[in-house]
Amino acid sequence: MTTESLTNIFLNACLINNFVLSLFLGICPFLGVSAKIQTATRMGMAVIFVMLVSSTCAFGINKILIRFDAEYLRLICYIAVIASAVQLVEMFIKKMSPGLFRALGIFLPLITTNCAILGLALFQTQKGYNFIQCIAYAFGAGCGFTLALTIMAGLREALDLSDVPSVVKGTALTLILAGILSLAFMGFAGLGG
Amino acid sequence: MTSTNTVMPMAQPVSSFKMIRTVAGVSIMSGFMILAVVKATEARIENNKRVALADAVMAVLPDADTNKTFEVTGDGFRLVDTPVPGADRVYAGYDAEGRFVGAAFEAAAQGYQDVVRTLFGYSPERDCIIGFKVLESKETPGLGDRIGKDAEFLANFDGLDVALGADQTALAHAIAFVKRGEKTNPWEIDGITGATISSRAVAKMANERSQQVVPFIKRHLDQLKEGT
Amino acid sequence: MTPQDGTFQRKAEPPVDAFLKGLWEENPVFVMLLGMCPVLAVSNTVVNALSMGMAATFVLVMSCALVSVLRKYIPKQVRIVTFIVIIATFVTIVDLVIQAISLEIYNALGAFIALIVVNCIILGRAEAYASKNDPMRAILDAFGMGIGFTIALVCLGGVREFLGFGTLFGVRVTPEAFEPWAIMILPPGGFITLGGWLLFFNWIKERKGRAAQGEAA
């Protein structure tokens, strides 16, 4: 348990230690889904939801594992919970909004292998947050992810219309862009201090 | 992704039994494998942690040869066995003859990039901090991470005054952060130019933690001296 | 050879090819663009890069071996769950083994050891290859992919440590006058270095393409 304030935790997860641009989590969807702004924001929303659900479950599971002194089972339990949470979200979205479901397509099940979600669960355990802090952290991480994705999508959409040398086209350009974005986000450091 | 070259026949309905059997079987097998490795590596991992902790404590309590770990409880210290570090732990150092030389405690605060964790060595006899070590830091290499390397900054912690006030419940003078070159009192920490936020964080955590722990240590000093 | 279950299978490729393709042609990081997260995160020094590469290769080889051995007994519907449980088991094992060997390396790699579980390379190979081929080929394929992954990691680690610290393997190799570019060790450096390598490989491919066209013309 730390004495960090909730705003601090949120800002930390969203801006200062952005999951994508600082911690290198969730790069695969970041590179894969950031071509269009709309898909990016939708993926972001789905991720925020899954993060909140997984964070809660991970918190509960951790308490149980500590009680039974079985902390080496943590990884397996977390990944099982995340896979189930994604399955749940998939069914939920299918029922509530078939349009959104079709738009997200293959990306929804891919959230399971999104290291950002597992990373979130592992980090919050490591930092020893209590329940409310976990929620703030998960929400911040999700928002940060969505932010990074949306900005990148905006940039890529604009670049689609520009003259780009063929050597650099594609992932190479996205990565260099991401590097510059990451550099920009470094400016947020010290925000919490 | 590589394309599959198999042509699937009409899918036969797979019995639930088979599915459950597979998942259960694999899970049980996994459980056994993990348990086996846990048992095999337990001793070594404990030992590694013990050594790492001892190294850290020796670094901040120069005269110590051995150490014991105590947990802070409501009414004193409780000796603990496991070398797991924690915010509520105090590590007592003893020299070769078993005499108490000082206590080490952890502190943490938000630095520039992320939380910085440190270990302070405290000598109740001299009423001051005698050692400092950075345990965990993600500060900028070459800038913020100088809190662990800058010789002048580290010199701050060789005799940092933490004497208690008259009522023995708080420090007589709170540890204060000053700019490099402006230090005039033994309870001040002068920072590193170019690493203000990181060094200020260290000063902040030094003060906060000392205010909490030093009076407590003084009150229950006998427990630490006896080592029980 | 007529398979019993009525499926048609292409002739299994020679074992050597199964190993070699992971190194260059189908390099998981540079060509298939999988498993980027750890490549960017732990490639700030060569030692870290190597450790991560070896850990991931171990998990990859063991998981693919087990999946291949059990492939006839895993019903299609539960295959992803089963794969993930198997992979998670080996990751937990590797996590414990690294802790036992060196706490320092363990702290340097941090959470990314556990994150090997969701490394798309491992799940990808288990699904695309190991579950459809015999153990020997599955192991060779996994080994090749693992080494390819390690090569990518070391390429990045080498550049980043050299420019960011002025050292290689912790040994100073640049003259005193060289002021290290701290940015290379930080996240932006990771992105830009990987982008740089991809740019380089694209350039090579283009040159080869133009040379081939030139020859054909």
Image (cartoon, rainbow, N blue to C red):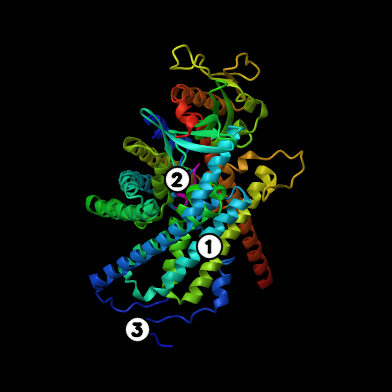
Q: Secondary structure at mark 1?
A: helix
Residue at 39% across, 73% down: C70
Say which mark, if any, is on residue A153: 2
Hey, which residue is sitting farthest front in the picture?
Answer: B97
Q: Quadrant of residue B216?
A: top left
> Majority secondary structure of the magenta segment?
loop
**Relative to B180, residue C26 above or below:** below
Q: Residues within 10 Å of mark 1 (few under 14, many from 20)?
A: many
| Label 3, label 1: how far apart the Cα atoms are | 34 Å
Residue A93 visible from this viewpoint: yes
**Relative to B33, residue B54 above or below:** above
Give the residue pinned by disc 1: C57
Quadrant that contains the C terminus of chain B: top left
Residue at 59% across, 29% down: B131
Residue at 77% across, 43% down: C175
Residue at 71% across, 38% down: C179
| Label 1, label 2: how far apart the Cα atoms are | 33 Å
**What's the amino acid at mark 3?**
Gly
Q: Which residues are magenta?
A: A22-28
Q: Quadrant of residue A124?
A: top left
Give the residue pinned by disc 3: C6
Is A27 a magenta residue? Answer: yes
Measured as percent of width and height from the top left, residue B83 is found at 47, 43
Q: Which mark is first along the chain, 1 or 3?
A: 3
